[in-house]
């Protein structure tokens, strides 16, 4: 039990912070000092979770099968990488929140508890090794985020956005659960590795039912990461939510969604019986990626509200990331690749930091509780408030993929990895990605032009001075510049993270083949006893083949 608890220490830290905030806040005075305290408290414990994840990454067990609680959660390099990234996003969200909430009359202690509960759910999502733990973690995250979107209780737009998000999210959760039911029916198990083992041999009508299961679960995941055509909720939710929450959704929710999606597809669908799926899945992902990046960028061109621009741009970035996923899942059993790709984790780092920087800068600009997120309202921001203007401009430039920012190197590595798949099989898709990146530069740089090259309008902007908010902007901006200047280290960490999935899957299948135990031994013995008698010198009867049946 202690071993299990040690492996999930980052998750326990986030859970403790959420519960402590929920229990203690009612006994504190509802003043600005207590609200600032909870912001710093949440940031400190989120940072502590990051430290715990880094220590486990450096000194803990490094195989994917370093699992806790009966194969429901893991502490692999892959899981720990994304747990640390979720913790960082959570810390910056806490730092961005206190003053904004006070200015907008929405400063309640349960806000910080909800952020921590959402982070706890996300950290369990990326560490999930079974369908059960994945679904429970996803629902913990979703319920908290639904409440956060509608947290501006006096704003009709916020409440409406939260209700829309809740209804559509509930449908996505139902699709996910339905797809999981099909996977369980085909495999007889809920743990990823056991699903892959059970599907090592063909199942009657398995291609159809497995395809249906992947379609249902895939649609649910596409909703969670705001990819077209399941992106309809994003613009209203991004615009209606408190600005720090919008940054949290754009960064941490997308990180957790993609991390869970890649692991589910790569691990649970890695058996030889999946050959048809292995052939079709990369093509499907590439097609959805092209649709998502094109729809997102074209719709973003028509927007004049920066929050809606970033909402549609998140749809486009989901498309870029889905194309990167092609390089991860195209060859689940080393039939073509010798080196793992680290493009998806690396890109997620850059996108998360740029999104957090942008929304922190927007949170710093207000007017007596009114949000100023229109392009015209940001005119002259760079002269009136140089620091916030510089951070917002840097975030826009990084999201556009302009060198030498982190966003540029993320897209560059993404393109390189996708081009390496089957000797350039997806060249056309990469060309579409490049064209879309050029299109996106127009609306990203348009925001920068308003910040620096347009005269100030008649709307008076008030700059919210708050040390925690300044720290959030500074940390996010520093990450964009520093990691962009030294991308090699972050890329190697991302490669090791993905490699831990591949190594874990390969070792699990090898152990299954070479050392059958338990129920599999009984199955082999039963098959051998039922086989016809053979002469001593004859080859073993086919029924005694250790690969017969669906062993666990």
Image (cartoon, rainbow, N blue to C red):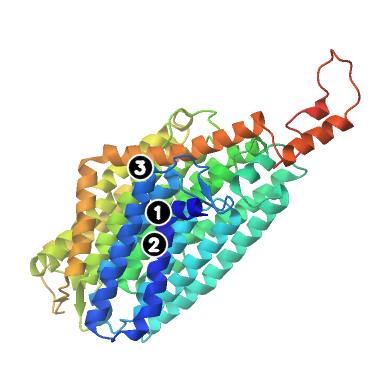
- Quick one: 440 or 510, which is closer to the camera? 510
Give yes or no for contact between labels 2 and 1 (Cβ–Cβ under 8 Å).
Answer: no
As drawn, 390 above or below 97: above
Which residue carries the number 3 mark?
A: 58
Left or right position of 202 against 35: right
Q: Which residue is drawn at 83% across and 35% down?
A: 526
Q: How crowded is mark 3: few (under 14 residues within 10 Å), some or many (20 or more)?
A: few
Task: Tell me the element at label 1.
Answer: helix
Which residue carries the number 2 mark?
A: 13
Task: Tell me the element at label 3.
Answer: helix
Mark 2 / mark 1, whichever is N-terminal: 2
Mark 1 / mark 3, whichever is N-terminal: 3
- Quick one: 266 or 459, which is closer to the camera? 266
Q: Which residue is drawn at 50% across and 61% down?
A: 223
**Residue 118 location (% of width, % of height):** 43, 66
Label 3, label 2: how many angstroms apart (C-alpha)? 18 Å
Which residue carries the number 1 mark?
A: 83
Left or right position of 351 against 131: left
């Amino acid at each position: 039990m202690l071993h299990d608890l040690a492996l999930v220490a980052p998750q326990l830290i986030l859970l403790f912070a959420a519960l402590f905030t929920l229990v203690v806040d009612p006994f504190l005075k509802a003043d600005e000092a207590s609200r600032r305290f909870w912001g710093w408290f949440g940031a400190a414990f989120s940072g502590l979770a990051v430290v715990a994840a880094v220590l486990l990454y450096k000194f803990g067990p490094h195989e994917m099968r370093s699992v806790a609680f009966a194969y429901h959660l893991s502490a692999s390099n892959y899981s720990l990488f994304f747990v640390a990234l979720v913790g960082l996003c959570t810390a910056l969200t806490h730092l961005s929140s206190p003053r904004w909430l006070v200015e907008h009359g929405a400063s309640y202690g349960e806000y910080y508890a909800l952020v921590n509960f959402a982070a706890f759910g996300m950290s369990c999502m990326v560490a999930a090794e079974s369908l059960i733990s994945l679904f429970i973690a996803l629902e913990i995250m979703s319920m908290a985020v639904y409440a956060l979107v509608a947290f501006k209780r006096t704003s009709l737009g916020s409440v409406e956005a939260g209700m829309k998000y809740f209804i559509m999210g509930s449908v996505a959760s139902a699709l996910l659960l339905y797809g999981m039911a099909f996977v369980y029916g085909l495999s007889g198990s809920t743990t990823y590795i056991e699903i892959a083992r059970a599907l090592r041999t063909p199942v009657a009508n398995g291609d159809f039912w497995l395809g249906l299961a992947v379609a249902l679960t895939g649609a649910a995941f596409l909703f969670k990461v705001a990819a077209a055509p399941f992106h309809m909720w994003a613009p209203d939710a991004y615009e209606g939510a408190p600005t720090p929450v919008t940054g949290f959704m754009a960064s941490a929710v997308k990180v957790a969604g993609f991390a869970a999606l890649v692991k589910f597809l790569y691990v649970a669908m890695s058996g030889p019986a999946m050959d048809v799926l292995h052939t079709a899945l990369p093509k499907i992902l590439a097609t959805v990626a092209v649709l998502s990046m094109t729809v997102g960028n074209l719709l973003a061109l028509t927007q004049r509200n920066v929050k809606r621009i970033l909402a549609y741009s998140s749809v486009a970035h989901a498309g870029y990331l889905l194309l990167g996923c092609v390089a991860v899942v195209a060859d689940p059993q080393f039939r073509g690749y010798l080196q793992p790709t680290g493009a998806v984790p690396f890109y997620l780092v850059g996108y998360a930091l740029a999104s957090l920087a942008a929304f922190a800068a927007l949170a710093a600009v207000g007017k007596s509780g009114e949000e100023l997120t229109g392009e015209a309202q940001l005119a002259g921001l760079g002269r009136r408030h140089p620091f916030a203007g510089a951070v917002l401009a840097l975030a826009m430039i990084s999201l556009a993929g302009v060198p030498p920012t982190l966003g540029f190197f993320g897209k560059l590595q993404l393109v390189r990895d996708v081009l390496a798949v089957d000797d350039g099989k997806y060249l056309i898709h990469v060309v579409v990605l490049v064209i879309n990146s050029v299109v996106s530069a127009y609306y990203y740089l348009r925001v920068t032009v308003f910040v620096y090259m347009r005269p100030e309008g008649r709307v008076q902007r008030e700059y919210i001075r708050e040390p925690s908010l300044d720290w959030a902007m500074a940390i996010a901006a520093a990450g964009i510049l520093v990691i962009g200047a030294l991308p090699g280290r972050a890329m190697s960490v991302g490669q090791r993270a993905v490699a831990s999935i591949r190594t874990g899957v390969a070792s699990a299948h090898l152990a299954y083949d070479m050392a059958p135990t338990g129920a599999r031994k009984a199955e082999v013995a039963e098959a051998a006893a039922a086989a016809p008698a053979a002469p001593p010198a004859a080859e073993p009867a086919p029924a005694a083949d250790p690969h017969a049946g669906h062993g666990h």
